[in-house]
Amino acid sequence: MKYKRLTKEQQEALHQEFSTFLASQAIDKKEWDEIKLNKPEVAEQELDIFSDLIWEGVLKSAQFLEHFSKNHIFLFHCQELQLRSIILKSLDTNVDFLNKNGLQWLSDNMFTDNVEIIIGKKEYDNERNESIFKLINEGAILSDGQLYNQINGIVNP
């Protein structure tokens, strides 16, 4: 398995896609039920393959990621050959970006000495999708890029 298995909730949400996946392998519902009952290791392999296919699609189309922590906001633009980043760091340790007040504080203090802004870019260590998956596993979430583009437009006019 290249990535990780989808959760039960994710699998249930993708029920139709999974049915299509099984059908592409000429496995109907009756046969799938039989596989689950009599060959659980084969069923596990099918779930792993399906999970990897879903992850590949998601990661291939990923453009932006965000990762919020108490005193940092990491914004990523996932380009084809490199990852661009904007890191916002609160130098006031009482600020918490994980709540609404912390984000309001950032808005009010963005261009003061209380906020450090670090701009970076880096070629992917491994294959692009694997690098993006690693960031997601570390807590980043897919985003529409609005915050990245807004901050980027300010710091790189």
Image: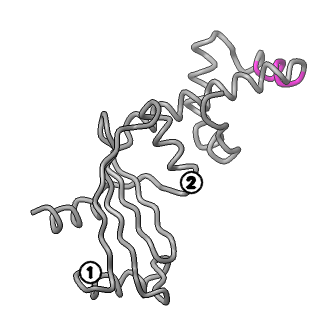
Which span is picked out in magenta? 32-37
Q: What type of secondary structure mainly makes up the magenta span?
A: helix
Pinpoint residue 104: horizontal percent, then vertical percent: 35, 85
In the rendered view, would you say 129 is above or below 78?
A: above
Q: Earlier in the sequence, mark 2 or mark 1?
A: 1
Judged from the image, the secondary structure of the residue bearing numbered disc 2 is loop
Q: CA distance from mark 2 to mark 1?
A: 25 Å
| Residue 89 occupies quadrant | bottom left
User: Going 51% across and 76% down the picture, which residue do you hit?
Assistant: 70
Pinpoint residue 152: horizontal percent, then vertical percent: 21, 61
| 107 left or right, relative to 51 | left
Query: Magenta stretch containing residue 34, yes or no?
Result: yes
Please state the total of marks drawn on the protein image.
2
Query: Magenta stretch containing residue 45, yes or no?
Result: no
In the rendered view, would you say 15 is above or below 44?
A: below
Pinpoint residue 55: horizontal percent, then vertical percent: 53, 35
Q: Which mark is residue 138?
A: 2
Badge 1 amino acid: Met
Q: Residue furthest top?
A: 26
Mark 1 is surrounded, within 10 Å at the Cα level, by few (under 14), some (14 to 19) or many (20 or more) other residues, namely: some
Q: Which mark is residue 110?
A: 1
User: Going 54% across and 27% down the picture, which residue do you hit?
Assistant: 53
In the rendered view, would you say 4 is above or below 138?
A: above
Are discs 2 and 1 less than 8 Å apart at CB?
Answer: no
Q: Residue furthest left?
A: 157
Badge 2 amino acid: Glu
| 58 left or right, relative to 106 | right
In the rendered view, would you say 17 is above or below 132?
A: above
User: Going 68% across and 44% down the picture, which residue do you hit?
Assistant: 7
Pinpoint residue 29: horizontal percent, then vertical percent: 72, 21
Quadrant location of the C terminus?
Answer: bottom left
Judged from the image, the secondary structure of the residue bearing numbered disc 1 is loop
